[in-house]
Amino acid sequence: MARSPLIVQSERHKIIDLALTVWLQMCTFASWFLVTLGVIHSLHTYRPMIKLYILDFYAKCDYVKKLVYASDETYIEQVRMNRIKFFKLCEMLQALGGLKSSRNMFVDEQVAMFLHIISYHLKNRVIKYHFNRSGETISRSFHNVLNVFIRLQDVLFKKAEPITVNSTNLMWRWFKVLE
């Protein structure tokens, strides 16, 4: 008895589908096995991305290293503060104000950015170029440091004392009102 051509064709499709399924399962198992052995780790992008992220993080800190650790003269020119006072300020902002390092930026870099901006009235774009950070990161760190400064204004800033009319200080004699 002869089989109909439709039955033969459907059996052939079933055999091809089974062979493809077995082939895909074998390829999946082989690739999983090779990945777990670490043979083809260079084909995956996650390992190089981690290395690039680490190198990028330290490259972004490079400008701060040049700025802070080059010399006192350079630092005073750029941030208008010597390094000893800068490190004391960073310690105060951390201890008293609660300023914390983020995942991508240390406290000294945040404070250096803040001081650099207010020293020369620089725009976000300029700091973005120098510090190699995004505009959002710069804005966020600037506002974090600014909020800590506002919280610590009683500790950091000296209160102004009014000058009385009968002041004996010779420096103020030129500003007295003539009657």
Image (tube, rainbow, N blue to C red):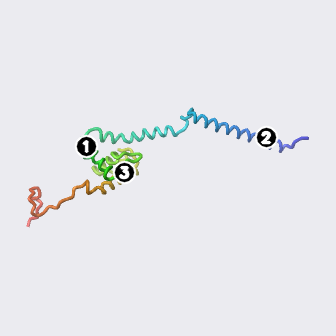
- What amino acid type is highlighted by mark number 3? Ser
State which mark lies toward you, 2 or 3. 3
* Res. 30 mark: none
Residue receiving disc 3: 141
User: Toward the viewer: 65 or 95?
Assistant: 95
* Res. 84 mark: 1
Among the two numbered marks 2 and 1 on one chain, the one whose residue lies closer to the N terminus: 2
Looking at the rendered structure, the secondary structure element under dot 1 is helix
* Residue at 26% across, 38% down: 71
State which mark lies toward you, 3 or 1. 1
Residue receiving disc 2: 12
Label 2: few (<14), some (14–19) or many (≥20) C-alpha neighbours in 10 Å: few
Looking at the rendered structure, the secondary structure element under dot 3 is helix
Horizontal and vertical percent for residue 91? Answer: 30, 47
Whether residue 177 sits left or right of residue 29 in the image: it is: left
* Structural distance between the alpha carbons of marks 2 and 3: 66 Å
